[in-house]
Amino acid sequence: MKTTKLNLLAVLILIAGMTGCATPQHYDYSAFQQHPPRSILVIPPLNNSVEAGAPYIYLSTITRPLAECGYYVFPAAVIDAFLKDNGMPTPGEMNTVPLDKVREVIGADAVLFVTIEDWGQKYTVLQSTTVVHARARLIDVQTGTTLWEGTALAKQGSGDGGGGLVGMAVAAVVSQVVDSIVDQTRGVSAMANTNMVFNANMGLPYGPYNPDSATDPRR
Amino acid sequence: MKQTIRIALICMASLVFLSACASKPPLYQWGAYEELIYDMYANPGKAEPGVQIVKLTEDIERAYAEGQRVPPGVHAHLGYMYYTQGNTSAAAQEFATERELFPESGTFIDGMLARMQKD
């Protein structure tokens, strides 16, 4: 009796392990496969949130996941300064940059255009939540084709610690005070971008600098 | 005996399960780079070019000493910091290193170098 259960457990764990990181083909990667980029230019995001600082905080958290995925990512702050020096003082103008100029002057294979949809602290009586929500589109510079789209979404609550309702209310207030001193959105933005890029079902295929790109079925 | 084999099988299976999605070591050593980008916009006082040069140089030296790779953009960013201080020779050196490490940066780097010569 015991040994049969142990056998079953072993088999189940083995199956789960073998399929654990398989990529179900829910997302259509055919456009990506026709123009796989080596390099990505990230344009400072458009902002539909109420937090004016959101675009540049977001920008400071997108390089790492894209680079770790395996792409060359142009230096975000240098690019920002360059665009500002060239008649595009804010993300509004930057997001209209012509692709032929990008190809000619920057030489990127693809551009990531991002829109921030929601950003910052949300308060209810019992909960303080940090939210980051952004949408991203990867556009092929040669053809203007959309290679990939992703959603970056992450939330972090003030904690589900003990103390019942009073404890939660106190935690929410403490969080509200702390959040006004310490910017939680940076960490949550990093989490959102990492989840977006490395999503098992809809993530970005590995890039040329990542050894896993050789065996990535999505490429 | 049979019991030992079964337990060994479960252990091996669990190892497969855990390692199938185990996090691999990062491709690059990130150091202060993204935090400096954050500070440039959120706390500009903490990201003066001089401070950035010190921190990024430390990061690059540590990565080199530990056999780790410097991320895309770091040398170019450091070069830009030198440029803002008027140190065009150090800037040119960092831009050249960026292009050597990451040939995809070639068009942009060549443009930066050309514009720097004209200044």
Image (cartoon, coloured by chain):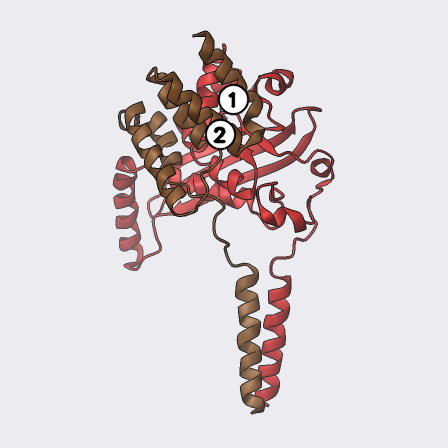
Chain colours: A red, B brown
Q: Which mark is residue B98?
A: 2
- In the figure, residue B14 lies in which quadrant? bottom right
Say whether residue A11 is left or right of residue A77.
Answer: right
Dot 2: what SS?
helix
**Label 1 marks which chain's residue?**
B
Residue name at image x 63 percent, y 43 percent: A205
Amino acid at the residue labelled 1: Ile
Q: Pointer 2 indicates a residue of which chain?
A: B
Where residue B55 appears, x then y in whole percent? Answer: 31, 34
Q: Is residue A180 left or right of residue A37?
A: left
Q: Determine whether B23 is above or below A93 in the image.
A: below
Instruction: For the N terminus of chain A, give its image quadrant.
Output: bottom right
Q: Position of residue B42 (x, y in %)?
A: 33, 28
User: Residue B109 shows which numbered tag?
Assistant: 1
Badge count: 2
Q: Are marks 2 and 1 in contact (CB under 8 Å)?
A: yes
Question: Which sits in the foreground, A95 or A169?
Answer: A95
- Extreme top residue here? B118
The quarter holding residue A147 reads top right
Going from N to C along the chain, the mark reached first, 2 or 1, is: 2
Disc 1 crowd, CA 10 A, few/some/many (<14, 14-19, 20+): many
**Of the numbered discs in the image, which one, if any, rests on residue B89?**
none
Q: Going 67% across and 51% down the picture, which residue do you hit?
A: A215
Q: Quadrant of the C terminus of chain A?
A: top right
- On the image, the x and y values in percent for residue B88 come to 39, 17
Other residues around mark 2 within 10 Å, as few (<14) / some (14–19) / many (≥20):
many
Q: Is residue A90 above or below residue A178?
A: above
Disc 1 element: helix
